[in-house]
Image (cartoon, coloured by chain):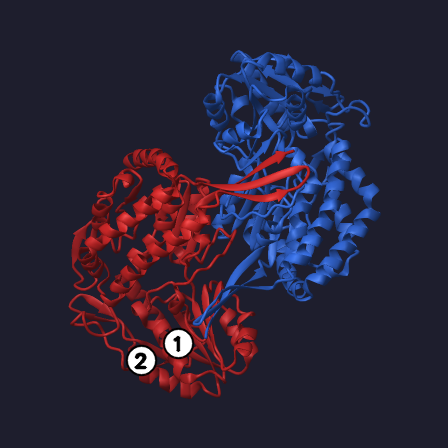
Chain colours: A blue, B red
Amino acid sequence: MKVRNPRTGLYDYEISQLSFETLKIKADTMRHAQKSWQAIGIEQRIKTIQRWKKVLERHLEELTEVLIVDTGRKIETVYEINLVLTAIDQFCDLAQDYFKVEVQTILHNNTYHIEEYSDPFELVGIISTWQFPFQSAMMQAIPALLAGNSVLVKPSEKTPRFVRVLEKTISQIPHFNNLLHFIEGEKEVGEMLCSITDLICFTGSEEKARKVFETSAKHFVPAQLAFGGKGAAIVTETADIESASSAILWGGTFNAGQSLESIERVYVHRNIHSQFLSRLVGKSNLLTLNYPNIEYGQIGPIITEKQATNINEQLADAVKKGAVIVAGAEKCIVQKGSIYCRPTILTNVSHHMRIMREMTFGPILPVKSFLNETQALDFANDSNSTFNCSVFAGKDSEAMKIARRIKSKSITINDVYMGNRFYRNEKSSTNAAETKAENIGTFSFKKFLNHKNLMFKK
Amino acid sequence: MKVRNPRTGLYDYEISQLSFETLKIKADTMRHAQKSWQAIGIEQRIKTIQRWKKVLERHLEELTEVLIVDTGRKIETVYEINLVLTAIDQFCDLAQDYFKVEVQTILHNNTYHIEEYSDPFELVGIISTWQFPFQSAMMQAIPALLAGNSVLVKPSEKTPRFVRVLEKTISQIPHFNNLLHFIEGEKEVGEMLCSITDLICFTGSEEKARKVFETSAKHFVPAQLAFGGKGAAIVTETADIESASSAILWGGTFNAGQSLESIERVYVHRNIHSQFLSRLVGKSNLLTLNYPNIEYGQIGPIITEKQATNINEQLADAVKKGAVIVAGAEKCIVQKGSIYCRPTILTNVSHHMRIMREMTFGPILPVKSFLNETQALDFANDSNSTFNCSVFAGKDSEAMKIARRIKSKSITINDVYMGNRFYRNEKSSTNAAETKAENIGTFSFKKFLNHKNLMFKK
């Protein structure tokens, strides 16, 4: 399969897929290697991961280069690589504490002694996405490895160029032999992963999450699904318009809006609507494309042609139904094969438009005014899938009151989720649809472990 | 649909199924009622549950009677009703503490303040099983209700007679109006539940768990699956033969072996094999059927004809392949329409026999000797699905060493899981295949809640 270059539009790279038979044999070998990886203990696992980090740092230039070709943008590439390198240390620190306590006493009385401990799943399959190709793969692979699993990663076939560079770094770590693999492949390889691994960890669109869930269920393989949503921002009358407009613009246009967590709709109190809108438009007009020089500007290319079509269709649907474009353009522009979308702000929008309800995945911010809190909440909650929301208000208490009534996995007050990627956060969820995978915390390990009970009768 | 009476073999009861349209409307109404149920707060929810408990106690006789007809056995009926009534109080106690803290601070530093809080799923669908019909439904329904959900329960169509009695008790609790329902129905109703609820909570066989997982995945509904396995017991050379044989006999024959947690295979060190076997046989020969008088004996009927066929086939397969029956009989016996299976002990068994690898769901204990620890572990781990195992040894340290290497969700030392049903146990799991649903602990609530994050930037 030939892969398109997002900056030239040329199909200049080719990936090759393993057959199911080969993959099955690989899986068996990896399950075998997992046993000694688990047996060497957490200290050695941390040391090995740190050794890998050093190798990655030695290949930083090459890695950066291929990721830039994969995605067509530079700022975000540097950002995601730095983020992963920092995260490796954070995960290792956390693992040191977390795995120190191997057995936890749950109950101890005159009759019973009950303990809990954990075992890895053995072979974890990771299906990662193209928006942040390196980050979305590594933020799962690192904790899965630390937890003692063997790990088979299939990054998106849209951004596959970094796979071979990573494999080169992996081959320099003896402990990773048959333990960790990044493989190329399309949908079919993802489906194979759902049948040969012990846990599937997916990051990507809801549409694909549904398919992965269905396929893994068919094979009775548990799936952890991290997918985005139609992120909303609510701006109340008392909000600081200056900082709210800056945060929302960043949350909506970073990585050209191609993020699972981006803000895709804005609800503003009618008394400040025009004021907010003019600040947002003013600021958005200052943003420039990373074109022709990748070193300048803030807005990179739309990575896939399919996404560009989706953006164009949603914009056309909105305009047809009465939306007014107050910044940006009615459709993506093609420059020598690469596709760009100007930060685009719409007003006069309604929930009858696709752009208010479906994932756009572009730097598009439709802004709608609301009368009161109740209406703002009705708007924000009128979406099938909301992963993160933001509330901007003058007082925390006011924001809190609204925030608690939003149906969303994550809510940020006076900031956007994208600004909060890094913090330690323990969470536990029994949903098959796990949407908070990226946070660093002990949950990162827990999800890669099977928890077991051991009971003594005294 | 006509339902068989396990004591007479007569099809003397009829269930009626709701149409999909009616069920869909019911689901909408229940989702609506959920809002006020959540809003009244935990104190009122506990009070309501306690009020229901009182109503249940007033209908104890009637409830016991229908459950005896449903299952054909009495001791276990009394046991499961008592268990549920005690559990109600335990769940309520635990809920008082658990829901007191509504918001938990995760991080608090100079830049960020992060909180976690929870919301119910809204409408929880429970698909429960026939082995312990009342218990398997109620042990999910009670925590789901306390967590603020509306709850729609479909007990097994094999044991449906208690449904109408429960509905009668529910109708006496005004708060339960449109909030809690037990409905009759076969497989199709279960499938409907997988499409109209926000979370599916299943208890039953692995075969059915796989189907439920597939169906719920198709509708992108998260599923929590509690299913049994081929429970194994390992008896080392140093074990107390007297107490080990008693515990294993009980763990293998309680409820005529019709339990997700029953012991279905025994591995005994060869040096004590014959001694253990003779004690086990001696004790098993003292057990008698609950027939003709339900008041006497320990072994109730095999509840479904399908199960009896399965037991007979597995026994025939084992005997054909060389197994020797040292207690019990080669097949189930039919007495005036009801089917019984004597506690049956097999020796000279191997893992080529279905009885050593597939769920039997009968009072059958195949006993195999082992040479050493490694072989015992190989045997115990040679099963696709093991939910619980027991290790019997003279020293805890010896048992522990073995226990830690068993692939099983739950391991009991010097006892069987069935004896440990009640303890407070907090556990967290991200597996879609959740196998530890029955324990009472904060996990019981967590699994019925969506966990959310709220972040402040300071």
Left or right, A6 with respect to A65, comes to left
In this orientation, which residue lies closer to the viewer: A413 or B236? Answer: A413
Q: Residue drawn 22% across and 55% down?
A: B57
Question: What is the chain letter for disc 1?
Answer: B
**Element assignment for label 2:** helix
User: Image quarter for residue B284?
Assistant: bottom left
Q: Which amino acid is tagged 2?
A: Ser
Question: What is the chain letter for disc 2?
Answer: B
* Mark 2 closeness class: few <14, some 14–19, many ≥20 residues within 10 Å: many
Residue pointed to by mark 1? B366
Q: Please provide percent x and percent y for residue A87.
A: 71, 46
In this orientation, which residue lies closer to the viewer: A156 or B245? Answer: B245
Q: Is residue B130 visible?
A: no
Q: Is residue B358 visible?
A: yes
Depicted A13 relative to depicted A357: above or below: below
* Mark 1 closeness class: few <14, some 14–19, many ≥20 residues within 10 Å: many
Residue pointed to by mark 2? B284
